[in-house]
Image (cartoon, coloured by chain):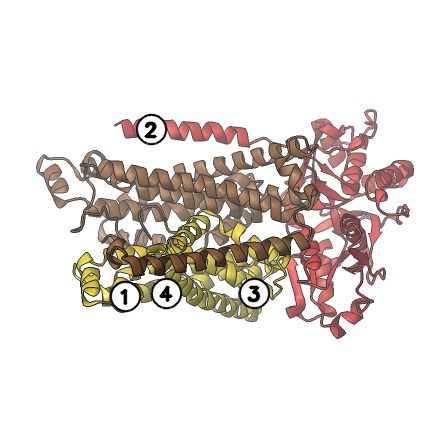
Chain colours: A brown, B red, C yellow
């Protein structure tokens, strides 16, 4: 349903009313912004010294700050990329196992998936980083973070892939089997490629989630963006400004990824095989997404 | 099938990327003490092993002003860092061959037990519980726990005044001061963060009324506050800082103690270059304890 | 395993505090999220703009950064309070963006005929939204909302790093760091505690989903 059916095309009275509320809302927003500005000013948050290391190229610390941030961003992206790749692989394996499992061990796989889904990522990362060294597994924080993120995201991806496989028309599987393909071949050659195509937007959204979760690396001293921001803040003493920059960077990157997911979804739904409901909107299973295809599950 | 190529390509790229992430180490800044190349160590001792290796791994803090703080250049600097360099130089290891690893308060015993570092110099207070897991060399400095409050706060004159003022106190998770302050305030009035800068912010905005930790660290925070904070000035505990090494390594402990005792001038210089910039008094090396 | 039994009161208190944080956060984010969804579909452009920006900011920003601004930014603005409330506020702000999107997709799933009929009968925007659309949308919205809530329960662990003491993650931190206990049993206890919340929660939401499911 297009949401504009919720209200008629506005007539003169409605237009006046909309204008009135618009002005009211506009004033409200401006008032809040002004109050915020005034309070920050009182706390001397608009001091040049706090902003210039981040924005002014002539400041002596500018280059160092951005060098550190650049390293940190690279670290974040590296961790995210590794986690996504491993999760994809393991997640697909898990999904395939669950779909093809004989009942006697399916419950084990299902149990594992439900177990891993119920634990917070931060606990998983903490767990991996504290427990593995006690058994002699000595790795850099990067790998603990990647392992923790992979454990968590592979089950999410397993569910996404499974939903994708289940959402394909039955005819595909039946046609493949009638051609004489084994179960494994059916999955590999027919079902998975289509499932991936259908699930691509959701997978990209999951990438956004992974990127955000890399910020949890700070609890195990991995030098990703949020932690390095903390170190910079210790030296420069400008937490609000630095974290504002970090927030903007994250928002821009993740927003771009979100738009990418929407674009991919639109391209795929142009005549290709995706799921369509009665009202024509391309819909992916609701228990996986939380919104117009670009939400992911936090 | 193109999809498979994409997967292979991504995995290769990811592995290549991960190679760049490995092997990053941090060397310290500040002065470089002269390296002692002629020292002879008994076979089988940690000193001999380190001298042979030509490098050491040292655990220190990256977020303690004046003692171990990672600067904008990515290198840790501070009094602890200088002491580490001094010890390394006597092992024949130059300052740029030291790999500094971040050891926040909570992981110090673990990293020593697991051999991830060779020794830890990280505002490491000596206490009996820790002594059960590791051995301490030193002490190399004696701090005391103190309180930092806002400049115009006259109500809080010491730890006993905290309860009366119903004050909220801030400290860092897993640190000794955080445990000790529990005898003076209710648990509900203790706020814990992972770094001291957050405590300083909380004090500035009125979220807490006092910050507690070792007085030298507080001095660094007071200095950074540009007159907004002050030190209450009454140290109510004794915090001897030690150098953590593997449990039972008596020979290494004795070597470190000897190094500290024989190099008073280097010790003073280490202080003056770091914490001394803020603290008026240069401390004397405390009597090093017997090794066990 | 003795660690868990010896410190059972810590675990129990942590469990209850986590539940408390989650309870407040669920209520707050549901309310705020629905309001933002209403903003996004309203005829007033600035409200639409507020809703869209809200979602874009809070969906794309990591929770850690949001919590940071709540714990340290709000006091800068002169708003002082217990860190518990800042933690809950951060969780609410972050989750409300996801709730908003879930509710909005629910609104979109209600057949257009419903809204047209409401307009034909003469209901205003807010009346049609509250009496016709939202009640129907809420039924479709249960599955995605359910996963958002489970995810939020898990995110409550992060709040522990921002001055909120006493919840489960902080308990694990205290036991493994300050008291030097071995990590495996301590964390196993914490994991079990979380599963005690998320698994029954998941089962309850699954039951709810089946109960309100509509054959479309």
Q: Are marks 4 and 1 in contact (CB under 8 Å)?
A: no
Q: Nearer the viewer, mark 3 or mark 4?
A: 3
Q: Are marks 3 and 1 in contact (CB under 8 Å)?
A: no
Q: Nearer the viewer, mark 4 or mark 1?
A: 1
* Drawn side of residue A127 relative to residue A37, left or right: left
Regarding mark 1 in the picture, which secondary structure is present there?
Answer: loop
Regarding mark 4 in the picture, which secondary structure is present there?
Answer: helix
Q: CA distance from mark 4 to mark 1?
A: 37 Å
Q: Quadrant of residue B145?
A: bottom right
Regarding mark 2 in the picture, which secondary structure is present there?
Answer: helix
Q: Residues within 10 Å of mark 4 (few under 14, many from 20)?
A: some
Chain for mark 3? C
Residue that carries the numbered disc 2 in the rendered image? B6
* Drawn side of residue B280 relative to residue C99, left or right: right
Sequence-wise, the earlier of marks 4 and 1 is: 1
Find residue C201 and name its label: 4
Q: Nearer the viewer, mark 3 or mark 1?
A: 1
Sequence-wise, the earlier of marks 3 and 1 is: 3
């Amino acid at each position: 349903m297009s949401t504009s059916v919720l209200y008629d095309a506005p007539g003169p009275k409605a237009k006046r009313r909309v204008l009135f509320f618009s002005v009211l809302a506009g004033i409200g927003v401006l008032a809040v912004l002004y109050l915020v500005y005034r309070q920050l000013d009182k706390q001397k948050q608009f001091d040049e010294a706090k902003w210039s290391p981040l924005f002014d190229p002539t400041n002596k610390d500018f280059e160092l700050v951005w060098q550190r941030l650049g390293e940190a961003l690279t670290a974040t992206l590296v961790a995210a990329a590794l986690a996504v790749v491993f999760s994809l692989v393991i997640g697909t394996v898990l999904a395939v196992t669950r779909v093809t499992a004989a009942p006697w061990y399916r419950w084990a796989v299902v149990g594992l998936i439900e177990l891993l889904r119920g634990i917070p990522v931060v606990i998983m990362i903490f767990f991996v980083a504290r427990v593995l060294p006690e058994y002699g597994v000595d790795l850099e924080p990067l790998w603990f973070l990647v392992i923790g993120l992979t454990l968590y995201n592979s089950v999410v991806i397993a569910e996404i892939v499974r939903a994708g496989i289940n959402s394909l028309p039955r005819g595909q599987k039946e046609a493949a089997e009638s051609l004489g393909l084994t179960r494994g071949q059916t999955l590999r050659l027919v079902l998975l490629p289509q499932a991936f195509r259908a699930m691509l937007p959701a997978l990209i959204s999951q990438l956004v989630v992974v990127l955000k979760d890399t910020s949890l690396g700070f609890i195990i001293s991995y030098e990703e963006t949020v932690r390095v921001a903390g170190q910079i803040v210790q030296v420069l003493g400008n937490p609000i400004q630095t974290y504002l920059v970090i927030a903007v960077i994250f928002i821009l990157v993740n927003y771009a990824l979100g738009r990418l997911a929407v674009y991919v979804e639109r391209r795929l739904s142009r005549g290709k095989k995706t799921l369509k409901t009665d009202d024509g909107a391309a819909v992916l299973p609701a228990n996986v997404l939380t919104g117009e295809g670009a939400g992911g599950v936090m | 099938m193109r999809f498979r190529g994409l997967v292979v390509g991504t995995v290769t790229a990811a592995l290549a990327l991960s190679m760049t992430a490995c092997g990053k180490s941090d060397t310290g800044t500040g002065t470089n003490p002269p390296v002692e190349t002629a020292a002879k160590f008994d076979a089988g001792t940690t000193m001999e092993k380190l001298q042979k290796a030509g490098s050491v791994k040292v655990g220190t803090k990256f977020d303690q002003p004046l003692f171990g703080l990672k600067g904008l250049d990515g290198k840790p600097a501070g009094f602890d860092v200088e002491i580490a360099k001094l010890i390394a130089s006597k092992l024949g290891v130059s300052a740029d061959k030291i790999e500094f690893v971040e050891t926040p308060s909570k992981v110090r015993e673990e990293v020593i037990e697991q051999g991830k570092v060779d020794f830890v110099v990280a505002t490491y207070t000596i206490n009996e519980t820790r002594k059960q897991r590791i051995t301490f060399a030193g002490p190399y400095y004696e701090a005391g726990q103190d309180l930092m409050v806002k400049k115009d706060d006259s109500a809080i004159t010491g730890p006993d005044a905290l309860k009366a003022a119903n004050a909220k106190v801030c400290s860092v998770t897993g640190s000794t001061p955080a445990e000790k302050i529990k005898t003076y305030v209710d648990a509900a009035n203790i706020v814990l963060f992972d770094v001291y800068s957050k405590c300083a912010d909380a004090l500035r905005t009125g979220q807490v009324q006092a910050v507690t930790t070792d007085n030298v660290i507080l001095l660094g925070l007071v200095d950074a506050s540009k007159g907004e904070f002050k030190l209450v000035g009454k140290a109510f505990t004794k915090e001897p800082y030690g150098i953590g090494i593997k449990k039972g390594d008596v020979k290494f402990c004795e070597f470190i103690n000897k190094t500290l005792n024989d190099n008073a001038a280097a010790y003073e210089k280490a202080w003056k270059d770091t914490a001394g910039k803020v603290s008026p008094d240069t401390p004397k090396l405390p009597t090093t304890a017997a090794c066990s | 395993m003795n660690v868990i039994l010896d410190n059972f009161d810590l675990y129990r208190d942590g469990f209850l505090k986590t539940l408390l944080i989650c309870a407040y956060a669920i209520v707050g984010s549901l309310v705020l999220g629905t309001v933002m969804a209403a903003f996004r579909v309203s005829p007033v452009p600035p409200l639409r703009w507020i809703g869209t920006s809200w979602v874009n900011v809070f969906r794309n920003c990591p929770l850690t950064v949001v919590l940071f601004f709540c714990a340290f930014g709000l006091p800068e603005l002169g708003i002082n309070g217990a860190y518990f409330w800042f933690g809950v506020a951060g969780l609410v702000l972050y989750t409300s963006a996801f709730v908003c999107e879930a509710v909005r997709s629910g609104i979109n799933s209600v057949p257009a005929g419903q809204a047209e009929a409401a307009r034909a009968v003469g209901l205003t925007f807010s009346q049609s939204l509250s009496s016709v659309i939202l009640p129907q949308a809420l039924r479709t919205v249960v599955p995605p909302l359910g996963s958002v809530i489970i995810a939020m329960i898990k995110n409550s662990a992060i709040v522990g790093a921002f001055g909120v003491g006493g919840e489960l993650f902080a308990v694990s931190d205290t036991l493994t760091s300050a008291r030097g206990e071995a990590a495996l049993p301590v964390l196993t206890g914490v994991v079990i505690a979380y599963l005690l919340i998320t698994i029954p929660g998941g089962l309850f939401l699954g039951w709810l989903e089946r109960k309100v499911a509509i054959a479309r």
